[in-house]
Image (tube, rainbow, N blue to C red):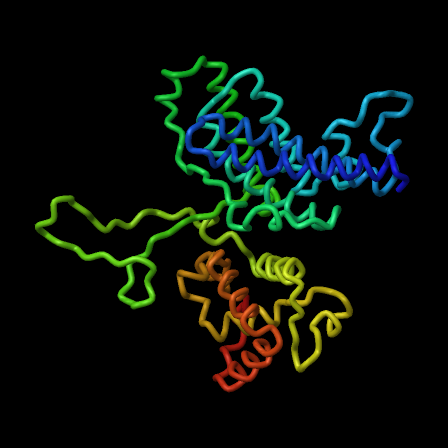
Amino acid sequence: MNSREKYTYDRLVQKAQEAFLLSIELYNRPTIKYHVEGCAFFLCNAWELMLKAHLVEREGLDALYYPGNVRTLSLEDCLKKVFTNAKDPLRKNMEKVVDVRNTSAHFVVAEYESFYGPILQACVENFDRQARKLLGIEISDLIPENYLVLSVRKSGIDEDECRARYDPLVLEKMLEKQEGILTMADELDNRKFSCTYVTELRSTKKDTADHTFRLAQDGDTAVALVKVPVEIKNKYPYRPGGVVKAICERLSKGGIALRQDGVDTRMRTKGKRPFNLYMFGLFTSFYDMKGDARYSYNSALEGEAPAYIYSQQAVDLIWDKIRENPEGVIDRLKDEVSKRPKPTPGAKEF
């Protein structure tokens, strides 16, 4: 890059990061109700600036403009130039976020949060990954990683209440958007399009609990323990391949070299994924994840072979153990699992 391109690139990168941080701050600020619309506006701004910085670095300043025109590329056209696959869940996600930005100028609907929240959460995570991949920057250098989780209020839409509050055309449009997002989320089943984090409180008698309480019949305030239906896809968002990918991303981001038999696993796989399904199987076997509701759920229909999907808690457990001992954890698990009785043939392992 020449000096002019370098100056433009640096400014775009700086402003992209500022817009991204502002989008998160707006969403998580409890004193405002303009969460979805404000977040979407600044997320779109952040994405456009980031992609333009990447184009300047890759192709030069001329790449930012339409041929024979002084206008710079729109966000949609930047996305098409960088992510050429129109079916990419990331592209699908950005289409929904851009749609929020465009329509919020005409009307504001508080209920958007219930179904756009997971879309925005996926958009935030996509930006974090692409900023690292395209620009080589770490968002976690500017903001703690746990702050990248949006405080999404997950609640259903009361259609009767909405009918009393909104014009019929507004209600129809809102329900149409909700149905489109939920349908696409089911079809894609990909965290690049939509993802949710769930905070769960579970009663346990173990002394490792984070909080303690006691039940008193004569207390001033009545408390009851209840069981609430759980949305399976929210609690167990990962298929085995998704767990492997999540761990590989964390290894890359943390600069951690996982070893097996004293050799960097990236060398064993010729530069491919440093963590694979075989290693994942060692963790599921050693920690008895299958059948443990904290970590897994059997999504198979009656009569089918078991097919497990996994929770964020399963990913976190694996990551914690790898981070504690990246040089020896795989060998230790392999040795321990080899001493156990072999599983019954025919069962689906993951």
x and y, in percent, of residue 77 in the image: 77, 30
Asked whether the viewer can see residue 187, the reply is: no
**Residue 106, quarter of picture:** top right
Quick one: quadrant of the N terminus?
top right
- Taking 190 as reference, is 88 left or right? right
- Foreground: 7 or 350? 7
Q: At 50% from the left edge and 74% from the top edge, which residue is drawn?
A: 285
x and y, in percent, of residue 284 in the image: 50, 70
- Foreground: 61 or 5? 5
Q: At 49% from the left edge and 17% from the top edge, which residue is drawn?
A: 170
- Foreground: 29 or 124? 29
- Taking 67 as reference, is 169 left or right? left
x and y, in percent, of residue 42 in the image: 61, 31
**Residue 53, quarter of picture:** top right
Q: At 50% from the left edge and 59% from the top edge, which residue is drawn?
A: 310
Q: At 23% from the left edge and 51% from the top edge, which residue is drawn?
A: 225
Is 177 rendered above or below residue 278? Answer: above
